[in-house]
Amino acid sequence: MSAYILPILFILLILYCIYKRINTYDHFVKGAKGAIKLVVDIFPFIASIMIAVALLRVSGITTWLTQILSPIFNFLGIPPELCELVLLRPFTGSGSYALLENVLATYGADSYIARCACVIMGCSETIFYVATVYFSQTKVRKLLYAIPVALLCSIVGTILACLLCKIM
């Protein structure tokens, strides 16, 4: 049934456009032109985030931060093995999924650490990436509260995720 949802929605959209006498092709082309402009506009912001993440990993800063923050994370109930995942998740989605894959391969899918990693991935977001994309297209330039609040919520979600995995 789920394989038919998108085709059905597509057909319903075309039927709606025919009923409202909307030239779907012209609107599609107009939307595609807008999407290309959007990609060109946000590319420098996304490239800067990707370069920053690559520099953090290659320089060893994430490894160094992991070693320093490991005792603090352990005190908060976050397994030390997940420190790098918690540090990189706000910056990169694909990088954090690579770390998740490594955790699953190393500790097994049913382990406490793997369950924590999966819940952390589900309850957190790539904060800096999302902020870059959204705020680059709006007139909002004062990010004084948005980023710190999002990071605080992410760490609270991570702590609660590990607590729930320990209880269940």
Image (spheres, helix red, strand yellow):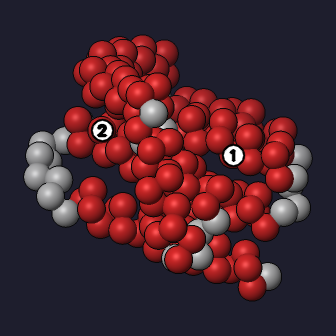
Q: In the figure, is residue 131 to the left or right of 23? A: left
- Residue 17 in the image, given as x and y percentages of width and height: 52, 32
Residue farthest to the bottom, as pictured: 167
Residue occupying the point 36% across, 61% down: 151
Residue 29 against residue 16 in the figure, above or below: above
Q: In the figure, is residue 56 to the left or right of 6? A: left
Q: Crowdedness of circle 1 by 10 Å Cα count: few (<14), some, many (20+)?
A: some
**Dot label at residue 100:** 1
Q: Nearer the viewer, mark 2 or mark 1?
A: 1
What is the distance, in whole Å, between disc 2 and disc 1 at their CAs?
A: 23 Å
Q: Amino acid at mark 2?
A: Thr
Residue occupying the point 36% across, 15% down: 36
Residue occupying the point 64% across, 65% down: 79
Q: Crowdedness of circle 2 by 10 Å Cα count: few (<14), some, many (20+)?
A: some
**Res 132 quadrant in image:** top left
Cβ atoms at labels 2 and 1 below 8 Å apart: no
Between 69 and 123, the residue placed more toward the observer is 69
- Residue 111 in the image, given as x and y percentages of width and height: 84, 63
Label 1 SS = helix
Which residue bears the numbered disc 2? 132
Label 2 SS = helix
Q: Amino acid at mark 1?
A: Leu
Residue occupying the point 54% across, 48% down: 84
Residue 144 against residue 59 in the figure, above or below: below
